[in-house]
Amino acid sequence: MKVIIHGGFFSESANNEATKIAKQDALSAIVLQANTYLQTHTALETVVYAVSLLENNELFNAGFGSQIQSDGKVRLSASLMDGKTQRFSGVINIEEVKNPILIAEQLLGYDDRVLSGTGALSFARENGFGYFNPFTQQRLIEYEAKLNQKNRQGTVGCVALDKDGNLAAATSTGGKGFEIPCRVSDSATTAGNFANHFAAISCTGVGEDIVSAGMATKIVTRVTDGCSLKDATEKSFAELKEIDGFAGIIGITASGEVYHFDSHPYMVWAAFDVSLQVFN
């Protein structure tokens, strides 16, 4: 049983050491909670649980604390994939909810499993997800000062391997800030979040680059075809470099290989290993 989480890239607070430490401490605490949860729950349940904790923490750009789009609204996207059943679900640009990953989880049992905008919100309300204001004072200050144009990377995610050998991945984002309203990121697509029987990947970075590279699906496919996670990741990032792409990933294979990689050394992450405990 293994679990790894990420809190996106650190570029938005690169000069603030206190914030960097706070984020890493939060990740360490959450990965411990996720590991405890994994002992009695499936990989699918665990990735939802871990990402919901990340969404609840205003330090991260997902759920509460998300970036504000150019029209002054916060729109959230999240997705979930069960490696065991190969079912993918997600919500895109949903407003006024607290935990988009929980709505993605609810959708997993439906035929229509990826919803956007008002349709996603209607589904959420019909299924008991009430109103929530995701704005934070910090994001409002950044928005008013137009600082978000420099702070373009941010997502949270979790991948897990449970005691039965099942894998799952979950990813959630509040966008890049000041984007065109209703821009679609990678987080609610299989380019940014993918799992099967062999591997599970969650991405962060520039969504357009990740989609152009088909990042999560490509890495998992290479592992499925026999590559190690490390080799599959590094080959995929070499291809990403050809388009000057910017991304980071966390991943786990069915054999227990855990790996993380990014274009620049700014991605914040934490993992739990029974021998090493928390490491990041």
Image (cartoon, rainbow, N blue to C red):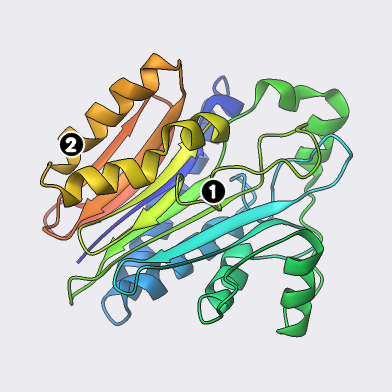
Residue bearing the label numbered 1: 187
Residue 29, x across and y down, in percent: 41, 56
Name the residue located 56 percent from the left edge and 80 percent from the top edge.
Answer: 110
Q: Is residue 30 left or right of residue 238?
A: right
Viewer-side residue, 161 vs 215:
215
Compute the Cα span from label 1 to label 2: 22 Å
The image quadrant of residue 279 is top left
Residue 234, x across and y down, in percent: 23, 28
Residue bearing the label numbered 2: 230
Q: Is residue 228 left or right of residue 122?
A: left
Could you tell me which secondary element the residue under label 2 belongs to?
Answer: helix
* Residue 234: mark in rendering: none
Name the residue located 77 percent from the left edge and 68 percent from the top edge.
Answer: 119
Q: Is residue 3 left or right of residue 13?
A: left
Work out whether 52 lies above or below 216. below
Name the residue located 45 percent from the left edge and 15 percent from the top edge.
Answer: 244
Could you tell me which secondary element the residue under label 1 belongs to?
Answer: loop
Q: Residues within 10 Å of mark 1 (few under 14, many from 20)?
A: many
Amino acid under disc 2: Lys
Residue 232, x across and y down, in percent: 21, 37
Q: Is residue 237 left or right of residue 181?
A: left
Pointer 1 or 2: first along the chain: 1
